[in-house]
Image (cartoon, rainbow, N blue to C red):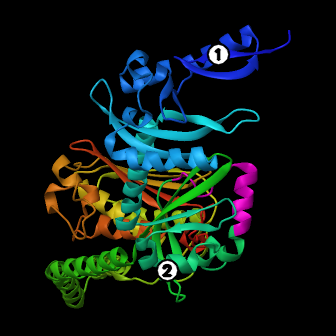
Amino acid sequence: MRGVERPVQVGAGFTRSCRMDGATEHFYEALCRTAGFALVAADRALTIRAWNDRAVELFGRPAESMLGTPLPDAFPEDMRPQLGVLIRDALEQGLSNDVEFTIDAPGGEERVLVAIVSPIVMPQEPVSGVSVVVRDITARRAAMRAVRETAARLRAILETAAEGIITADAQGRIESFNPAAERIFGWTADEIIGRNLHVLMPEPHRSQHDEYIRRYLATGQPHIIGQGGRELTGVRKNGETFPLDLAVSEVQVGSARIFTGIVRDMTERKRLADELATSQRMAALGNMADGVSHHFNNILGGVLTSIDAALMSDNPRTFRRTLERASDAIGRASRITQQLLAFSENEYATGEPLDLNDAMRKFVLGLRPRLEGRGIELVEDIQTVPPLLVESHRLPPILEALCQNSIDAMKSGGRLTIRMSADDQGVMISIEDTGEGIKPEHMERIFEPFFTTRAQVSSAAGGNVGLGLSAVHGLVRELGGQIQIASKVGIGTTVTVRLPLKGHGDKPAAAGAGFE
């Protein structure tokens, strides 16, 4: 059907001349009326000729009251000067521009709007009017404001956090470095952003870090990521190494993978812990001095008495018995000395493989004579175990202290059971007695240096001078092991020591501060 030139009502009354059939006319009229944006159109005299349904909703004014009125009157008075400039640009230069403004909507709330002013141009004719398309951007502005506020809060958190916060991409390049990280590592953000994370690590991890990341990206098996805080070693800009606690997480943003590391400098905490440990050790040794002195005086008094009796006796049997008593007393003094040395030493020699089976056999052989006449039955449940990489002189004091404590707890006799076994994780040694047991109120303090309740506490409490478990605990920890105690008053006590198959002499190298 051939188009004809005829007047067409657009929206709520704007007429223009164009070539279109009746169906097209109705289509355009419906389009303008039901558009999702407010449409206001005016002729060159700026008389409103169109005011669609959305304009009615947005401005709260019906089309009948707006058609034929001046275009500027439809908008807030404070924006009319700027609107006038845009209308003039549209009519005279054919330009389209936009302006933002606010109105009080019919419901009373303030709305943020954007008005796009454009010329209305007919084919082969000059500009015949202007159209103003108005969109409500209140929700978008609120969302943008919320995003800005959230970003500002996050930025404030990053800037003021006590922990170092570092982000890096999947290639290990640093993307952000907060002020705390600057203080910890000595780099400024401007200096380090864009560099590889490995500059924050000591060797050999610095050279290996890129491979760590590639392996993680390929296999998905993390070394540190998502594993919680770990104590590692970092390196400052000046080359100084220091202990740090590192927790790493990963987040996917679109197709990008971002790694975030939370870093805490542990230097001061380590120093304070070392000072506290030293002061506790010195205080414990000081508190112990009187007890040790008194105990040694008793032992020496017994030795001297036995020697005097031997010298005065003409009976060979009496002479032998008195010397045996003196020898036993000297043995007790030697054992106390060994425990004191084990407790007070700080440096440990490099470990060599220790045959635990042979060491245990020799210990049990030496233990049996000490049980004679005490009414104590010795039970052995000793399995063959692999060798441990520990110093050979470290194990006997542990066994000696535990067994002596058990012997002291069974003054009326009982049963002493020694067990030894191994699994994939390590070797277990347990000393079990049927002595008096440990009272619940003493269990919390049982590992304190030199804690003792003398006669009131059983085996694990430390027997003679209260040295036992404090020394054993320190030795076991130095060997990378663990110690556990189970006790019940009137039933007895079991002390279990677990030692790793690779003793402390074969620890893995210290980890670097990697994000892998």
Whole-percent x, y for residue 3 in the image: 81, 14
Picture residue at 40% right of the left edge, 82% below the top = 346
Image-quadrant location for residue 268: bottom left
User: What mark, if any, has residue 199 been given in the picture?
Assistant: none
- The quadrant the C terminus occupies is bottom right
Residue 422 lies left or right of residue 309; in this view the side is right
Above or below residue 44? Residue 374 is: below
Whole-percent x, y for residue 15 in the image: 60, 20
Other-residue count near label 1 (Cα within 10 Å), few / some / many at <14 / 14–19 / ≥20: many
Image-quadrant location for residue 400: bottom left
Residue 513 lies left or right of residue 296; in this view the side is right
The residue nearer to you, when weighing 54 against 416, is 54
**Which structural element holds mark 1?**
strand
Disc 2 or disc 1, which is closer to the eye? 1
Which residue is label 2 attached to? 188
Picture residue at 21% right of the left edge, 44% below the top = 489
Whole-percent x, y for residue 455 in the image: 15, 59
**Which structural element holds mark 2?**
loop
Disc 2 marks which amino acid? Answer: Thr
Picture residue at 23% right of the left edge, 76% below the top = 280
The residue nearer to you, when weighing 197 against 469, is 197
Disc 1 marks which amino acid? Answer: Val
Q: Earlier in the sequence, mark 2 or mark 1?
A: 1
Which residue is label 1 attached to? 8
The residue nearer to you, when weighing 272 against 443, is 272
Q: CA distance from mark 2 to mark 1?
A: 68 Å
Determine if residue 417 is in view: no
The residue nearer to you, when weighing 430 against 50, is 50
Whole-percent x, y for residue 438 in the image: 22, 50
What residue span does the magenta drawing correspond to? 210-227
Check residue 226 for magenta coloring.
yes
